[in-house]
Image (tube, rainbow, N blue to C red):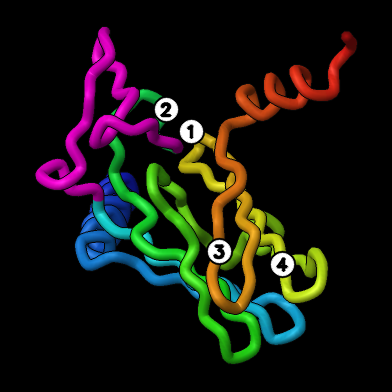
Amino acid sequence: MKAFALIIALFTLAFFVGVCNAKDGVITKIELEDGISLVFEEIPYDRDTDIPTDCGDGYICLVNNRPLWGADGKLPVTKLGKAIVKIDAAEIQLDTSGMYDPLISADRKSQYEVTHYYGEIWKVRASFSDGAGAYYAEWLVTRAGSIRILIGDSELLHDAFESIFGER
């Protein structure tokens, strides 16, 4: 019984430390190859500035009247505050609008990829998930700026590819 109480106390402490850490935001740096890195800032969801819309039966489908990714119909816990790709000395901001509960982890490096595309253009690809609301994003990046060219969950992306490349 004492072992069980100790385990519960440790889980409670770990949860409390995690909540305190999330209150200030968490910055994760992911070192890739060839002098390229990604920096993500995951910050707490703020219901005062990010206003949810309930679309029925308690299902959250919009935040600030725009679609959201990662929350899987629930009220988000965190959001992606900043995402930066560093290529040599250049630091390029990535659009993070609508990106919630990303669960960034340097331990899962395979979820993040920066590849040279053409000339001075790179592609940044990332997979995000808190366990339920998985989604993917892709940006085209130059040293001067970036544009997000894709965001969606697997069902949405499957539907898009079927529509474009499926049988006619």
Label 1 environment density (alpha carbons within 10 Å; few <14, some 14–19, many ≥20): some
Residue 65, percent across and down?
Answer: 27, 30
User: Can residue 9 be seen in this snapshot?
Assistant: no
Separation (CA) of disc 1 from disc 3: 25 Å
Residue at (34, 60) in percent of width and height: 81
Q: Are marks 2 and 1 in contact (CB under 8 Å)?
A: yes
Q: Are marks 3 and 4 in contact (CB under 8 Å)?
A: no
Q: Which residue is mark 4?
A: 122
Q: Of helix, strand and loop, which one carries label 2?
A: loop
- Magenta: main secondary structure: loop
Q: Which residues are magenta?
A: 45-69
Q: Which residue is mark 2?
A: 72
Which is more toward the observer, 88 or 18? 88
Pair 4/2: label in front: 4
Residue 4, percent across and down?
Answer: 32, 45
133 displayed left or right of 48: right
Magenta span includes 56: yes
Residue 155, placed above or below residue 45 = above
* Earlier sequence position, callout 4 versus callout 1: 4
